[in-house]
């Protein structure tokens, strides 16, 4: 799966699950992007899966890449 850690800081439900499963690695407490080192936290909110980037300002780029 393509890395979106520099353009997205929150994902929901099936998109969150797929991104965590296909792209991120767990370090025991958080999910980590192997490409950028961005860290993500999985949350569950009223039955909705939420994947939220930790300190996204460190990794998000304001300009679209490429
Ligand atoms: Zn990534």
Image (spheres, helix red, strand yellow):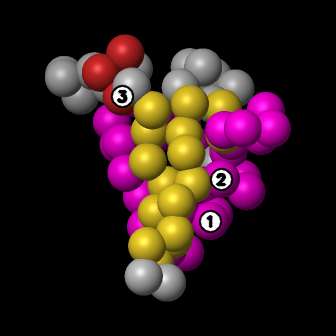
Give the Cα distance between marks 3 and 2. Answer: 16 Å
- Label 3 vs 2, first from the N-terminus: 2
- Residue topped by disc 1: 17
Crowding at mark 3 (Cα within 10 Å: few <14, some 14-19, many 20+): some
| Closer-to-camera residue (46/48) | 46
Using the image, determine if residue 12 lies above or below residue 59. below
According to the picture, the residue beneath numbered tag 3 turns out to be: 56
Residue 19 percent coordinates (x, y):
60, 55
Q: Residue at the location (56% across, 20% down)?
A: 36
Inter-mark Cα distance, 2 to 1: 5 Å
- Farthest-out residue, bottom: 47
Q: Position of residue 21 (x, y in %)?
A: 73, 56
Q: Assess disc 1: are there few (<14), some (14-19) or many (≥20) residues with their C-alpha within 10 Å of its C-alpha.
A: some
Q: Residue furthest top?
A: 58
Disc number placed over residue 37 in the picture, else none: none
Helix, strand or loop at label 2? It is helix
Element carrying mark 3: helix
Label 1 near label 2: C-beta < 8 Å?
A: yes
Q: Which residue is mark 2?
A: 20
């Amino acid at each position: 799966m393509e890395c979106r850690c520099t353009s997205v800081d929150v994902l929901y439900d099936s998109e969150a699950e797929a991104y965590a499963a296909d792209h991120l690695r767990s370090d025991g407490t958080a999910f980590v992007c192997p490409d950028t080192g961005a860290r993500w936290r999985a949350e569950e909110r009223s039955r909705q899966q939420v994947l939220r980037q930790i300190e996204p300002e460190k990794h998000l780029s304001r300009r679209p890449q490429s």
